[in-house]
Image (spheres, rainbow, N blue to C red):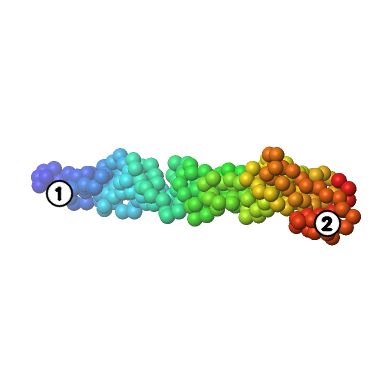
Amino acid sequence: DGNASSGCETNTASRTPPCGACGAACTLPNATPRCEAGRCAIASCNTGFADCDNDPSNGCEVDTRTTAAHCGGCGMRCAPAAGTGACVASVCTVAACNAGFADCDGTAGNGCEVNIGTSTQHCGGCGSVCAPASATGACVMGACTVASCNAGRGNCDGNASNGCETDTTSSNTHCGACGTACTTAQRCTGGTCSALTSCRAILEAFPSSTSGTYTIDPDGAGPEAPFPVYCDMVSSGGGWTLILMAPNSGSDFGYDSAAWTDTSAR
């Protein structure tokens, strides 16, 4: 105070202010200061701030409410996996995910936890389930594809959106496998093309059938092999199986001789 009568009245080693010398103010950013051994030190940081570099000269230099490297406290780094973090009100959040990843559970602690390029539960985006009909799905580069079809099914149109749309056990155009078509007057049963039992059955199944030689299998799954016959699809409503017994099976009776090679009585 410049008054000799009171002597050196101020302890500049511990008083704030002055600290260290007369007139030396002790003020620090974002902090409450104190004087220690003649030096200005931090007594406490303001709410939301911290002294993360342990240097009192710059006070409480870090805003822990917004700083990703010190989110909520010194050294608490906000760096979610496969993404970019953001510190919001001292809480680590996911600001953005890396390409091909997504934060589908909304938990910043595990970051962008889903690879949407390969996940069948989140294929191409959160919640986009890859489950094609009658098939096992696979997510390839974010697109749902058919990995395999269920037994008896086929993805014959190559479109994953409708799955394995074809029943290959009964489709005449895709019998047993995509692209395997049954011939005229055959029916796909259990994935196998088989002849029908008679000319009448052929006409009922294929109303536009014309008269000619067809293969029939009267006993179906029985032991007798299918054989060719001539079918009259016109007379009296059509569907007639023409049968001829002759002593010489090699004779030509005006029809395709191959239709008369079976000489057993029927």
Q: Position of residue 200 (x, y in %)?
A: 72, 41
Q: Nearer the viewer, mark 2 or mark 1?
A: 2
On the question of residue 11 being in view, the answer is no
Element under disc 1: loop
Q: To which residue does mark 2 refer? A: 261
On the question of residue 68 being in view, the answer is yes
52 or 76: nearer the eye? 76
Q: To which residue does mark 1 refer? A: 23
Q: Position of residue 216 (x, y in %)?
A: 76, 48
- Residue at x 21%, y 47% (from the top left corner): 26
The number of callouts visible is 2
Q: State the image quarter where residue 203 is shown.
A: top right
Q: Tell me the tag on residue 254.
A: none
- Residue at x 77%, y 53% (from the top left corner): 228
Amino acid type of the residue tagged 2 in the rendering: Thr
130 or 110: nearer the eye? 130
Q: State the image quarter where residue 65 is shown.
A: top left
Q: Position of residue 151 (x, y in %)?
A: 68, 47
Amino acid type of the residue tagged 1 in the rendering: Gly
Element under disc 2: loop
For disc 2, the neighbor class at 10 Å (few under 14, some 14 to 19, many from 20) is: some
For disc 1, the neighbor class at 10 Å (few under 14, some 14 to 19, many from 20) is: few
Of labels 2 and 1, earlier in sequence is 1
- Residue at x 31%, y 41% (from the top left corner): 48
- Please identify the residue farthest to the front as the structure is shown: 254
Left or right position of 148 against 109: right
203 or 111: nearer the eye? 203
Q: CA distance from mark 2 to mark 1?
A: 129 Å
- Residue at x 23%, y 44% (from the top left corner): 15
69 or 24: nearer the eye? 69
